[in-house]
Image: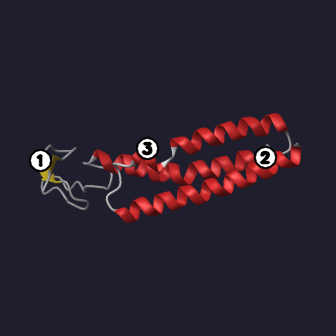
């Protein structure tokens, strides 16, 4: 088992979630200890938040060609930033990898369809 120092009293405790320090009572939370957990939480938030932001910007800018072009460039940037390929060493199991690839693929195919239909309406 991995040991960490308690952030409050510097007593050595286990790295596991839910471990309580015997000297001060500090409880180990999910984001303490392992740096991979913080990155995993950030990736999870990005995979949910970025498609939503892209959808909102594409829908609200679908009336103007220039604004829609800018929103599409923003969408492409956010899609590449949140691509699971960039976080391939983060996944613990193949199931997690499959779930995030499916979420990313479905969200981006939906956004590509909306973008294509918006551009075809304006042109």
Q: Which residue is found at the position 31% from the left and 48% from the top?
A: 36
**Considering only order in the chain, which callout, 3 or 1, is on the residue closer to the N terminus?**
1
- Does residue 49 sit above or below 72 in this rendering? below
| Residue behind mark 1 | 11
Q: Secondary structure at mark 3?
A: helix
Q: Which mark is residue 60?
A: 2
Report how far apart the C-alphas of labels 3 and 2 lie in the structure.
Answer: 29 Å
Q: Residues within 10 Å of mark 3 (few under 14, many from 20)?
A: few
**Nearest to viewer (mark 3 / mark 2):** 3
- Viewer-nearest residue: 75 or 22: 75
- Viewer-nearest residue: 16 or 40: 40
Q: Which residue is found at the position 59% from the left and 38% from the top?
A: 77
Q: Which mark is residue 86?
A: 3
Q: Residue 63 at x, y = what percent?
A: 86, 44
Circle 1/circle 3 CB separation < 8 Å: no
Report how far apart the C-alphas of labels 1 and 2 lie in the structure.
Answer: 53 Å
Q: Secondary structure at mark 2?
A: helix
Q: Residue 55 at x, y = what percent?
A: 69, 51
Q: Secondary structure at mark 1?
A: loop
Q: How is the image coloured?
A: secondary structure
Q: Residue 43 at x, y = what percent?
A: 45, 49
- Viewer-nearest residue: 100 or 54: 100
Give the quadrant of the N terminus. bottom left
**Nearest to viewer (mark 1 / mark 3):** 3
**Considering only order in the chain, which callout, 2 or 3, is on the residue closer to the N terminus?**
2
Q: Quadrant of residue 57?
A: top right
- Does residue 99 sit above or below 34 in this rendering? below
């Amino acid at each position: 088992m991995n040991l960490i120092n308690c952030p409050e009293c510097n007593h050595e405790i286990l790295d596991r979630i839910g471990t309580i320090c015997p000297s001060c009572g500090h409880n180990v939370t999910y984001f303490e200890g392992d740096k991979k957990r913080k990155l995993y939480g950030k990736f999870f938030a990005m995979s949910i938040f970025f498609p939503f932001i892209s959808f909102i910007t594409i829908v609200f800018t679908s009336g103007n060609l220039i604004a829609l072009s800018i929103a599409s460039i923003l969408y492409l940037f956010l899609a590449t930033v949140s691509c699971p390929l960039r976080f391939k060493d983060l996944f613990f199991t193949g199931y997690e990898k499959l779930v995030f690839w499916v979420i990313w693929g479905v969200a981006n195919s939906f956004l590509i369809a909306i973008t294509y239909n918006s551009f075809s309406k304006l042109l």
